[in-house]
Image (tube, rainbow, N blue to C red):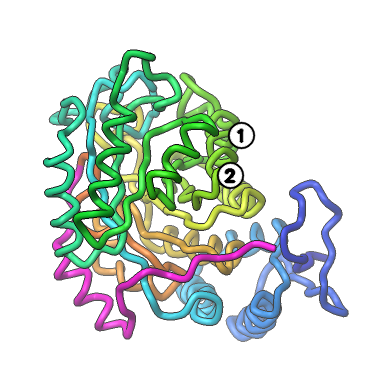
């Protein structure tokens, strides 16, 4: 028997339902009607405040039939509509410092250990350059604009470095001179640095866990999963929203994907970027097979069922992996997306994104932020 469980269970708790009776999950669904009936009850339970268990999420991950995957996506979309509405959170990013990174993340072409072909290398951009990017993001319809830097983190900067102070000054200029809200992704940081960012006006910070705790050492060895978690905790303690997600398609199992989602639930992160691996030439994952778009849709839907109120964001790889099925992701649980270009790859034109949203009856804006009791 597999149960839907209460809000915010500890990952090692004995899980039980807040409803009067548990929701039993068969090991397989003999007909689509059986699956539809079960999903209808699951959606009702989740919207009313119950939370899906790990065992139920794993059962759903075993669905392979495309029509059944689409039923799962429809269920996730119902949860999205009820818990998040029809506003799609739009943000844009800029790489303010690129290449020669000390870390060996297997997916990234900026690593000094395996620099990708044609990956740009440059030092910290000037405040004026970053402001130009912020103005372009605003013109493209973004409500948030994230300053992303390579490296393990500002926590490890030399005491002689003035880069953090330069970023703080640039954040203040963005607030004064544009209408976009500045976010940052500067790697690991201390509680004091998080507080300084908050004082400068940063309300959201991107720091992905990338993968489950178990799979992480297969992707990165120069720092630990626990290091990443500590920064997320520092952000939360400073009152900054955590934009924390991961990458699908690095060779991880469904158990890894689901464990990542439950870790994000336990950390109570507000925004969850879902990156779909677009293998970069020259990196250790360059030969990794590309995700099937229906597998990506299934992952998105299951993340939404596990994280019903969070902002779930289309991030890197959506164009390359989803192709003509991009719109289906926005009807499978997604309620946010990056627009414009990424760190080392190009995205599609913002005009195409806005047209896609309009065709789906969605509108760009700033999504409702979940509140945790």
Q: Nearer the viewer, residue 29 or 53?
A: 53
Q: Residues within 10 Å of mark 2 (few under 14, many from 20)?
A: some
Q: Secondary structure at mark 1?
A: loop
Q: Is residue 131 left or right of residue 6?
A: left
What is the number of the mark on residue 256?
Answer: 2
On the image, numbered disc 1 is attached to which residue?
214
Q: Are marks 2 and 1 in contact (CB under 8 Å)?
A: yes
User: Percent position (x, y) of residue 123?
Assistant: 19, 25
Q: Nearer the viewer, residue 28 or 276?
A: 276
Give, as a single range, the part of the protein colored magenta. Answer: 345-373
Q: Quadrant of the C terminus?
A: bottom right
Q: Quadrant of residue 164?
A: top left
Q: Quadrant of residue 60?
A: bottom right
Residue at 58 percent of width and 81 percent of height: 32
User: Percent position (x, y) of residue 304?
Assistant: 54, 66
User: Percent position (x, y) of residue 110?
Assistant: 26, 28
Query: Is 76 placed above or below 157 here?
Result: below
Q: Secondary structure at mark 2?
A: helix
Magenta-span inclusion, residue 361: yes
The Cα atoms of the two marked residues, 2 and 1, are separated by 7 Å
User: Percent position (x, y) of residue 9?
Assistant: 76, 56
Residue at 82 percent of width and 69 percent of height: 17
């Amino acid at each position: 028997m597999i149960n839907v469980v209460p809000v915010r269970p500890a990952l090692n708790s004995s899980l039980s339902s807040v409803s009067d009776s548990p929701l039993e999950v068969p090991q397989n669904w003999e007909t689509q009607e059986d699956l539809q009936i079960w999903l209808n009850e699951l959606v009702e339970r989740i919207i009313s405040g119950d939370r899906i268990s790990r065992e139920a999420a794993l059962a759903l991950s075993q669905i392979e039939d495309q029509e059944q995957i689409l039923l799962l996506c429809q269920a996730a979309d119902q949860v999205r509509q009820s818990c998040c509405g029809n506003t799609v959170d739009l943000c844009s990013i800029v790489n303010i410092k690129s290449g020669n990174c000390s870390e060996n993340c297997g997916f990234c072409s900026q690593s000094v250990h395996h620099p990708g072909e044609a990956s740009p290398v440059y030092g910290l951009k000037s405040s004026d350059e970053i402001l130009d990017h912020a103005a372009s993001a605003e013109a493209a319809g973004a409500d948030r604009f994230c300053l992303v830097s390579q490296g393990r983190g500002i926590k490890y900067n030399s005491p002689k470095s003035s880069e953090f102070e330069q970023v703080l000054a640039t954040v203040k200029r963005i607030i004064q001179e544009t209408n976009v809200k500045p976010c940052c992704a500067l790697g690991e940081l201390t509680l004091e640095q998080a507080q300084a960012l908050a004082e400068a006006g940063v309300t959201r910070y991107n720091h992905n866990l990338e993968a489950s705790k178990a799979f992480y050492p297969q992707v990165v060895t120069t720092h630990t999963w626990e290091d990443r978690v500590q920064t997320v905790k520092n952000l939360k303690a400073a009152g900054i929203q955590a934009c924390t997600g991961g990458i699908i398609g690095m060779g991880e199992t469904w158990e890894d994907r689901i464990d990542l989602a439950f870790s994000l639930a336990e950390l109570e992160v507000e925004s969850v970027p879902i990156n779909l691996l677009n293998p970069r030439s020259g990196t250790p994952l360059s030969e990794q097979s590309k995700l099937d778009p229906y597998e990506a849709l299934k992952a998105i839907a299951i993340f939404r069922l596990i994280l019903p109120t969070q902002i779930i964001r289309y991030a890197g790889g959506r164009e390359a992996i989803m192709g003509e099925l991009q719109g289906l992701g926005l009807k499978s649980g997604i309620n946010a997306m990056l627009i414009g270009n990424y760190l080392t790859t190009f995205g599609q034109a913002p005009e195409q994104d806005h047209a896609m949203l309009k065709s789906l009856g969605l509108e760009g804006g700033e999504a409702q932020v979940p509140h945790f009791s």
